[in-house]
Image: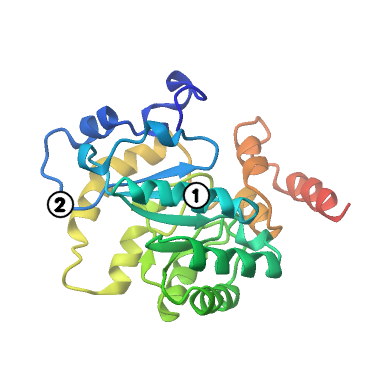
Amino acid sequence: ADESQFSRSEYGSMKFCSEKDIEKVINGEEVKSKISVMVDIGRVDPSTIPQKSDSLIDMMRVASYVKDIDKAIELANQIQAKGYEATINLMAVSHARERELDEALIQVERESNVDALYLVDSFGALYSEQVSHLAKKYKSLMPTKEIGIHAHNNQQLAFANTIEAIIQNVNYLDGTIFGIGRAAGNCPLELLLGFLKNPKYDLRPILGILESHFVKLKDEIEWGYTIPYMITGILDLHPRAGMKLRKSESKDDYLGFFDSLAQSDSA
């Protein structure tokens, strides 16, 4: 993110992922995997992105809504021109109108050189049938691009939806250790590795760091499936209302929360 727009003291260093921040995380260790960061449309200054030859980062993923696909393509092309791999994460696809989504996908195919475009279930609202339909659409309209899946676990379907994406020949699969992520979190990496059953993937290091760091971390911060995030997922709503509830004194007022959102959604 652009440091002129956000405060480090408020958001923390990983909001920015500067070279110094990445160096601190690596801490002199040999890097055996690619390093990827996310950039948001309007929240990054392209002129501050160094050339790939001067960076530890391998890939940048441009997060965008369908309405901003022009800006996403422009930014992704600028990133690739500096030597990075680039993808576009097309967010909130469950809210996208079919025609507008089709037009955006066709535009990505024609005007960008991105390595992949991600199907993103931002609100954890999609079911496997919808993932199947969307994956087929993406592959049909973008035959030269790889497709990715980024699932959220509001309805405990992140893993199932990722499996469905695999069945539809989606090759870029997002997962996080212990499902860590905003609100309901994402597809648990340990489940995904177990499902793939490929000898080149070793589950043991993930179990080790899960035991040594993530069990304690989950006692300190909350993420993952909870009823408020289930409710926002069912209603296909942004999880911000659930996040606000979980920080309040009435954090377990599930019925009242559901009624308030359902009434607003039907108004």
| Residue appearing at x 36%, y 36% in the figure | 49
Mark 2 Cα shell of 10 Å, populated few (<14), some (14-19), many (≥20): few
Disc 1 target residue: 74
Q: Position of residue 227 (x, y in %)?
A: 62, 51
Using the image as rendered, state which of residue 215 and residue 231 is in the foreground.
Answer: 231
- Give the position of the N terminus as an image quadrant: top left
User: Is 174 displayed left or right of 127 in the figure?
Assistant: left
**Relative to residue 232, is residue 100 depicted above or below?**
below
User: Is 26 displayed left or right of 180 in the figure?
Assistant: left
Give the farthest residue toward the right. 267
**Relative to residue 112, is residue 132 depicted above or below?**
below
* Mark 1 to mark 2 CA distance (whole Å): 30 Å
Q: How is the image coloured?
A: rainbow
Disc 2 target residue: 32
Amino acid type at mark 1: Glu
Quadrant housing residue 47? top left
User: Is 27 displayed left or right of 15 in the figure?
Assistant: left
| Residue appearing at x 64%, y 57% in the figure | 233
| Residue appearing at x 37%, y 28% in the figure | 13
Amino acid type at mark 2: Lys
Q: Position of residue 218 (x, y in %)?
A: 40, 41
